[in-house]
Amino acid sequence: RKEVEQDPGPFNVPEGATVAFNCTYSNSASQSFFWYRQDCRKEPKLLMSVYSSGNEDGRFTAQLNRASQYISLLIRDSKLSDSATYLCVVSLLMSNYQLIWGAGTKLIIKP
Amino acid sequence: EAQVTQNPRYLITVTGKKLTVTCSQNMNHEYMSWYRQDPGLGLRQIYYSMNVEVTDKGDVPEGYKVSRKEKRNFPLILESPSPNQTSLYFCASSLFGGQPNNQPQHFGDGTRLSIL
C-alpha cells in the first residue's frame, strides 16, 4: 500500500462547479499536510497547508481527518485556470525530515 | 528575484557518461532536496541536505550522489547514468527542514533527462 494515495482522475468538471477530492495517508504519525498544484509537468507550487481545524483560502478549503487518515481539498466556483494536477504531501514525525508525495489528482475544468 | 535555478533544463545523453545537474538557490535556505518524478509514481526524494556538509539519502538514492559545499548549491551527480534514470528531476529548497517539516518547498523549473 502506498504511503500517500490519491485518485489519479482525471476529474472532468464544468466551469463554476464545486469539486472535491481526497488524499489518504497510511502513517498515523503523519505531522504536516499540504496541497501543491502542478501544471503540465512544470514545478509544483504550494497551494495551501492543511491545519487540524481546517482552513480556507478564497475558493479553496482544506480539511484534515486524523481519525480516518485523510485530507481533502474542496474547490468552489471552479475556473478554467484551476485545471492542473493537485499533489497531496505529508510529512512524518521522526522521519528524518522527509516529505511523502502522492502521485496527484488531475483536474480538468471544461467551459 | 527569489528563485531556485536548475541547469540544464533538458539533457539527452548516453549510458555511462557522467553528468551533473546543478541547483542553486538565492534565498539563504538551509534545506535543499532532489526529487525525481515519473508517471503514476509522484515525486520521490533522491537526496536531501539539512545544511552545508550535511546530506542524507531519500527514498531512491541508488545511482546518485550529491554534495553541499556551499549553502546555495546542491548539485546532483550521476556517475554512470543508466536508462532507468530517465526522468523529470526537480530541485527544491525550504527555509529550514525542521521537525515537523512544515516549510513550503520552492522548486526549480525541472530538468528533463533522457539516458539512451
Image (cartoon, rainbow, N blue to C red):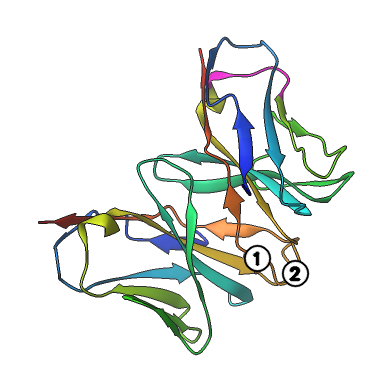
Alpha-carbon distance for marks 2 and 1? 16 Å
Q: Which chain carries label 2?
A: A
Which residue: 79% across, 54% down? Answer: B30
Q: In this view, does A19 lie to the left or right of A103?
A: left
Determine if marks 2 and 1 fall on one subunit. Answer: no
The picture places residue A83, in percent across and down from the top left corner, at 26, 54
The mark found on residue B103 in the picture is 1
Q: In this view, does B77 lie to the left or right of A67?
A: right
Q: How crowded is mark 1: few (under 14 residues within 10 Å), some or many (20 or more)?
A: some
Which residue: 50% across, 12% down? Answer: B116
Q: In this view, does A51 lie to the left or right of B39?
A: right
Badge 2 element? loop
Which residue: 15% across, 69% down? Answer: A16
Question: Is most of the magenta stretch helix, strand or loop?
Answer: loop
Q: Is residue A90 visible?
A: yes
Read off the magenta span. B78-83
**Vertical placement of residue A67 versus A92, above or below:** below
The picture places residue A8, in percent across and down from the top left corner, at 32, 54
- Check disc 2 and report the residue beneath it: A94
The picture places residue B49, in percent across and down from the top left corner, at 78, 48
Q: Nearer the viewer, residue B2 or A98?
A: B2
Q: Which chain carries label 1?
A: B
Q: Is residue A46 left or right of residue B70?
A: left
